[in-house]
Image (spheres, helix red, strand yellow):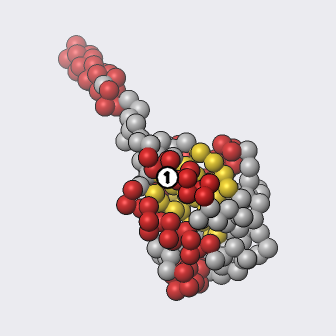
Amino acid sequence: MLLRTVLISAMLAVVSAFCSAPAFAQSPEACPAILNHQFNRLQDDAPQNLCQYKGKVALVVNTASYCGFTSQYEGLEKMYAKYSSKGLVVLGFPSNDFGQQEPGSSKEIADFCFNTYGVKFPMFAKSSVSGKDINPLHAELVKATGTTPKWNFYKYLIDRKGNVVAAYSSLTTPDSKKLVADVEKALAEKAE
């Protein structure tokens, strides 16, 4: 009995020391809550945890293949190509919420994006970005900004620390001076 008590006390001391050590505390390596979600990749339905993008600047965009704004794929891909080496990731979320403008299957959407616009930035399986079936990432983006997507190609910018910096209407193109300036400012800031 005494030996058991001593062993338990020793184990508790080790666990307590480990848990209170600075390495166990909230650290830069911890995933920001806004990114702590899993979605299936568009191309193959493989589960992807958004925590893989921690420490990066993320531009989250709800997309659609048959929309007047669909040509923004080209600008988004150019932005991704230009700034990805500096830490930008564009995250595409196809949605059929607005005007039923994304009716296709994952394979059809993936083929369209790549074959028409050369999209290489990460894209995820079709999901809802508004309403009662809103995906959990967009629910948090709406909560953080107080604004829901009004149409396809609505954008949210997340800084390296996981803070939602801004939301942009569908009318804000990827080459918009304001959006580019905000992205460059976020890229210049280091994650702590």
Q: Quadrant of the N terminus?
A: top left
Looking at the image, residue 136 lies above or below residue 101: above
56 over 144 or under it: above or below: below
Q: Give the image quarter of residue 168.
A: bottom right
Residue 19 falls in image quadrant? top left
Q: Label 1 sits on what residue type?
A: Glu
Residue depicted at 31% across the width and 31% down the height:
23
Q: Of 16 and 177, which appears nearest the observer?
A: 177
Residue 6's place in the image compared with 18, above or below, is above
Which residue, as the protein is rendered here, is positioned at the far right? 99
Residue at far left of view: 3
Residue that appears at 49% across and 52% down? 184
Q: Return the x and y of residue 45 as percentages of the image width and height.
A: 50, 72
Which quarter of the image is occupied by the C terminus?
Answer: top left
Residue 129 visible? The answer is no
Label 1: which secondary element: helix
Q: Nearer the viewer, residue 79 or 104?
A: 79
Q: Position of residue 189 (x, y in %)?
A: 44, 43
Residue at x 56%, y 75% (from the top left corner): 74
